[in-house]
Image (cartoon, rainbow, N blue to C red):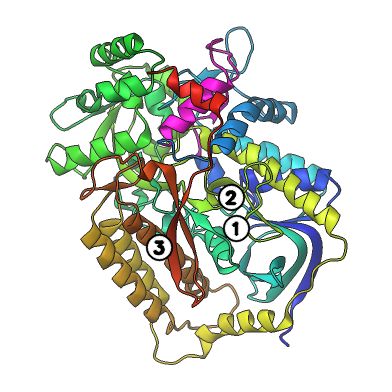
Amino acid sequence: MADYERHDYDVIVIGAGGAGLRAAIEASALGAKTALICKSLLGKAHTVMAEGGIAAALGNVWPEDNWKVHFRDTMRGGKMLNNWRMAQLHAQEAPDRVKELEHWGALFDRTADGRISQRDFGGHRYARLAHVGDRTGLEMIRTLQQHAVHKGIDVYMECTISRLVKDGDRVSGAIGYWRESGKNVVFGAKAVVLATGGVGKAFKITSNSWEYTGDGHSLAYWAGADLIDMECVQFHPTGMVWPPSVRGILVTEGVRGDGGTLVNSEGVQFMFNYITPYFAAETADTIDEAERWYEDKKNNRRTPNLLPRDEVARAINTEVKAGRGSPHGGVFLDIASRRSAEYIKRRLPSMYHQFKQLADVDITAAPMEVGPTAHYIMGGIRVDADTAASTVPGLYAAGECAGGMHGANRLGGNSLSDLIVFGRRAGMGAAEYANKLGAAPKLDDEALDRVSHEMNAHFEREGGENPYGIQRDLQESMHNLVGIIRTQSELDEALTHVAQYRERAKHTVVEGNRQYNPGWHLAMDLQSLLTVSEAIALSASTRKESRGGHTREDYPDTDAEWGKVNTVTRQGKDGQMEVTTEPLPQMPADLQELFQEAH
């Protein structure tokens, strides 16, 4: 048996972004001995990249706003593929979670009469995003982090979890390693919460940082849990495109929410050309209002830029392919001609400094060059809406690695409220499960030794391949073949490539030793990257329609029958990945009536 450092808890939370922090806070508050484990440093989470705001129907700017309107916007934005119960709980509970953050010390921007200010964002009927300039995610992390530390929750930083461990059919803990020393560490736990974020590093151009290699999705899949709707990947329409060193870094939707317009190389505000009466009808309460909405959008030079993200990303992609793009392969985002320099620096300080320092562009005087970037995955671990429980006993998930909440396309601002609503519910579900369990489940020594052997294998081979080359090829394949626009032939090609990369990954060789070794870390991450890449491509091949973040050139229409099912990814009996379809949960009649009002 290998030598392990060991720690035992009632609940361990893997991932320390907004969802993980909120889950740990809740589990600890319910009396569970709780640990928070993060791959990087505490506070270094992708939550800080969610800059524009937290979507919640507070009604501070528009008194007409309420949870039912927010629910309806979320479902429509997700093209009705959402888990209705998750969307309902999210809309109902988001206001209380925002007020809770304020109670814990979050400093939001204010309206003239002193209430939390709210801004416009794509797909939201009303100005709904509570914000702190364009640094809202950073303020959320600061607040949650200070609250968690104040509560005395144990935190393990720079620790990568490689596998979950089971006792029979239930989770009993996890094994990983310290990134600095390379030594093994084992956590025994009655319940595990996964809150690891997204999969962006499977793609060549992404807003995600190095940590986002699909760890939670893969850990759950390897443990036997279901994944749903993995084909639904959101390409944020506005990432930086120049210089190459910063390509993909996010440009917040808040720029457009505060008046920025998208312009092609001919000086045309092209988003007018992508507004349709159909979309107008989908966002209005009556046919008359839909017609007024459509006419207003045609005559208004700002609001078309706030269509849902999938619509804007496809529009930019079309403009670039038609030869109307910017010099570096994007389009222009102009706020300088619409707002004063003082306004821009006050409302968008991060964007001002980001472009000034990284691209030598003064956004108060010149437009930004932007283009689509792999940003967020709507698909993820299948969970129960009320408890955040996965299909494996003792395993819970929240945030981006959990599926269902956002359907086929996430509205901007819903990510931050998702984190705190379902982070809380995951922590609650895990603590209640752990508190009822009694004796802790056992750790399987043979499984621990097997994983430890896999970790060491990269140092013991000779004549193998460097993991960086495999990652580069995988990212190119996913970008070119499983990107914004997909076809069957390219998806088949991508799946062939992934199988080849998986074979190559079996022979990776890492030089040096286990002390802080980035090459070894990447060799370990490749297993997750390959798993989520296969799941995305195979699910995209299965869904033969276009819906939200999933666009098929060979199936360009949205099919009503496909709108009734989730794609479900799970391990087959032979260990091979399988994708099937299963019916969506049935929405109750009273909620269905909210959508009938619009027709």
On the question of residue 235 being in view, the answer is no
Whichever of callouts 2 and 3 sits on the residue coming sooner in the sequence is: 2
> Residue 578 falls in which quadrant of the image?
bottom left
Circle 1 residue: 40
For mark 1, give the secondary structure. Answer: loop
Q: Nearer the viewer, mark 2 or mark 3?
A: 3
Q: Earlier in the sequence, mark 3 or mark 1?
A: 1
Residue type indicated by callout 1: Ser
Q: Between 442 and 521, which is closer to the camera in this rendering?
A: 442
Q: The residue tagged with tag 2: helix, strand or loop?
A: loop
Q: CA distance from mark 2 to mark 3?
A: 24 Å
Q: CA distance from mark 3 to mark 1?
A: 23 Å
In the rendered structure, does residue 594 fall within the stretch colored magenta? no
Q: Disc 2 marks which residue? A: 44
Tell me, yes or no, whether the two marked residues, 2 and 3, touch with CB atoms within 8 Å: no
Q: Nearer the viewer, residue 397 or 270?
A: 397
Residue range highlighted in magenta: 50-78
Q: Amino acid at mark 3?
A: Ser
Residue beneath the point at 59% across and 36% down: 85
**Of circles 3 and 1, which is in front?**
3
